[in-house]
Amino acid sequence: MHTGRHRRIAIVGGGLSGAAMLISLLRSQYAGEIIIHEPEPEIGPGLPYGAAAPWHQLNVIATRASLREEDPDHWWQWAKIHGPALGWPDTRHADSHSYLPRRLFGHYIRFELAEARRGNPHATVTHERSPVVSIEEAASGFLITSRDGLVSFCDSVVLAIGAPSPNRLQVPGAAALRAAGRWIDDPWDPVRLRALPPDQPVLIVGSALTMADTVVSLRQLGHCGQILVLSRHGIVPEERREQPTRPSGLSADLSVLPLSTLLRQLRHAVALHGQDRWQGVFEDLRSYSNALWCSLPTEARRQFMRHLRPYWDAHRFRMPPETAQIVTGLRAAGILRVLKGRLNDVALTGDGIRARAVIRGQGGIVEMQASAVIDCTGPRQSDNDWAGGLLEQMQQHGMVQTSPCGIGIHATPEGEILASGDRIVPGLYGLGPALRGTLLETTAIAEIRQQASMTAERLVDGWQIPGRSGMRPRATA
């Protein structure tokens, strides 16, 4: 058996989930080796906090984004001290209810990583940038193969792979638009957005939070033309308003009831407290939504994903107030139009593009003119995302399977990966967006931080930790 000092843990993924996992392991005074596999040159910020523009805000108040569970004020107090020197002078006025810049949060992740490494002289951390192409079970551990051919042994593996890559929409004519620079697959690219004709209309496909961020970017970069937003449901996220928690009337004990009954009870609670206080009801539900979700029958969870997920997301993942004010103001002025429908085909014209869409309630095909299409459909939502990647390889070897909901990795609520036949793979864990489907709440900063802390505790349990007396028995699955 290895000693704690020589044990090796691999973290696959170096965005927020991977960084939170690394921080938790270091804070636990784990004394072995940690190998974090991340192709990007830096651990931590990832796309959400590294590619965000200076004006993009977190969509939660500051006390919900601390990376220190024991100190919910740490993030905003850090921002108040360090933000002005990093280019955000207004953060000197930050408080617990501030909505702070996402890119600044990326700096905060870097700071917390550095602090955790300084606080643990016993662990060895290695950053491997060659992408992992294969993970296989071996005697008492795992063999990890990187694209460069390097094969390494690890006792445990944490899949912190984050959200799937954004969709790359494929509709007739899209290839020609991409070749002509009239189709933007990356809405986070300020160079592409700035190059758009400022007075010409643009077509955004997708109406969730990525759309809202893109609208703000367009306005910040000087765009003043019309913005057309097309999505299947035409649902725009609500504005976040902090409200006192109010009883939702639901609990995990009610999971035996049909989904329609649960929805009626939630609506009844909202009506009881007042329509303008529904956000307080949702905050109450959030505290036990995962317990309720895990208790629901599989078919009920599938029904939720098929029929209710867009409505849940719009109410659960809300816009920060400043963003909401911009989006709402543009809609009221008629500059931003939200259409409910499906993009049918696109084509180049003399000075822009022509898009044809099936719009609900209007019958037949509706034609729109724009300077470009911006894809804001966000992360993929099915197991087809695994094609050609690490998860497909692991699935072929029976090490992972899709959750019964059809998205994310099948796992226990504690993050233990369930292989084919629902076999727990000892030492293989997942956290964060990788567990979509297994959990309902698994992508917010608070949930990722909590999952990382619990996973670190399970991983170090049974191994010698400097400063602790004796050995604790290893937890069993």
Image: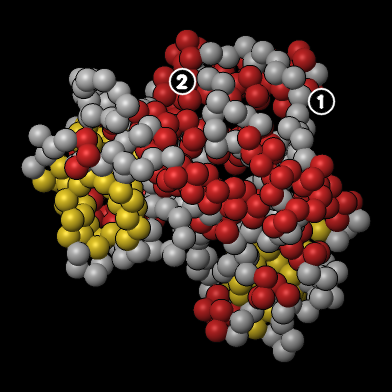
| Res. 211 visible in picture | no
User: Which residue is at a point 26% across and 35% down the rendered structure image?
Assistant: 418
Compared to 355, does 70 lie above or below?
Answer: above
Residue that carries the numbered disc 1 in the rendered image: 276
What residue is rendered at 59% in x and 48% in y? 108
Residue identifier under label 2: 291
178 vs 360, nearest the viewer: 178
Amino acid tagged 2? Ala
- Is residue 451 visible to the viewer in this orientation of the structure? yes
- In which quadrant of the rendered view does residue 7 lie? top left
Few, some or many residues within 10 Å of mark 1 (<14, 14–19, 20+): few
Mark 2–mark 1 CB contact (< 8 Å): no
Give above or below for 321 relative to 290: below
Residue occupying the point 39% across, 40% down? 120
Tell me the SS state at disc 1: helix
Residue type marked 1: Asp
Image: 414 above or below 176: above
Say whether residue 253 is left or right of residue 402: right
Estimate the x, y position of residue 247 in percent, counting from the top left.
67, 13
